[in-house]
Image (cartoon, rainbow, N blue to C red):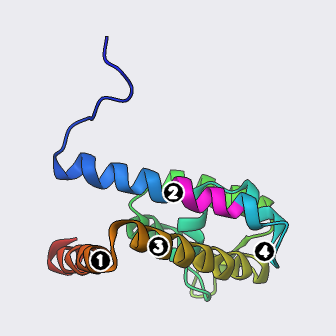
Amino acid sequence: MNDVKEPGPDHIMALLGYLMDGLRRDVLAATRATASERSVPPVLRDLRFSHIRMLSLTPPDGMRVSDLAERIGMTKQALGEFATALEGLGLMESVRDPADRRVRIVRPTALGRTVVDASAGLITEVEAAWRDRVGARNWDRLRDLLAAAVAKGG
């Protein structure tokens, strides 16, 4: 039986996954630790990272469900479920497109935009901690390489 502490695969997909898991863990820990200490909306403590990501990728003026699903990389049905959950928390609202009443537009509410701003601040803090942990030069190079990879084909 394998020990949990044994290193896993070291291919790029695994390494990026480990990095994302660590960043998510630290952002969620910061979210829960600071929600009561700052002007962070309490609802932020109860969100999953995927909810925060969806809110942050939704333009303030809104976007068609199908277009947002493509942007985020989800099915339209899954995105609709996420949107409904966020609507229930008062973070997102759904309206009909005036140009085509069959089309649903989702957009963050004022509270949703506040959550996006608060989570962006926490992400910046977590990134700064990771930058300190691995060294500024290494972190900056990693960011530059990831940005270049995304620009070339991501």
* Front position in the image: 148 or 90: 148
Mark 1 lies on residue: 143
Q: Residue at x 16, y 73 (%)?
A: 153
Total labels: the figure holds: 4
Residue at x 34%, y 67% (from the top left corner): 134
Kindly report the distance in space between the C-alpha atoms of the residues bearing marks 2 and 3: 11 Å
Q: Is residue 63 positioned above or below 49 on the image?
A: below
Q: Position of residue 152 (x, y in %)?
A: 14, 78
Question: Which amino acid lies under the numbered mark 4 shown in the image of this protein?
Answer: Val
| Mark 3 or 4, closer to the camera | 3
Which circle marks residue 98 in the picture? none
Give the spatial CA distance, label 1 vs label 4.
Answer: 27 Å
* Magenta-drawn stretch contains 35: no
Label 3 sits on what residue type?
A: Glu
Q: Which mark is residue 24?
A: 2
152 left or right of 137? Answer: left
Q: Main secondary structure of the magenta part?
A: helix
Region rendered in magenta: 25-31
Which element is circle 2 on?
Answer: helix
Residues at marks 2 and 4, CA–CA distance in whole angstroms: 18 Å
Query: What's the amino acid at mark 1?
Result: Arg
Vertical order, 108 against 17 (above or below)? below
Q: Residue at x 44, y 50 (%)?
A: 21
Q: Nearer the viewer, residue 90 or 95?
A: 90
Give SS at disc 4: loop
Q: Position of residue 17 (x, y in %)?
A: 33, 50
Q: Categorize mark 4 by other alpha carbons within 10 Å: few (<14), some (14-19), many (20+).
A: many
Quadrant position of residue 56: bottom right
- The percent coordinates of residue 112 (x first, y second) are 72, 76
Of callouts 2 and 4, which one flags the residue occurring earlier in the amino acid sequence? 2
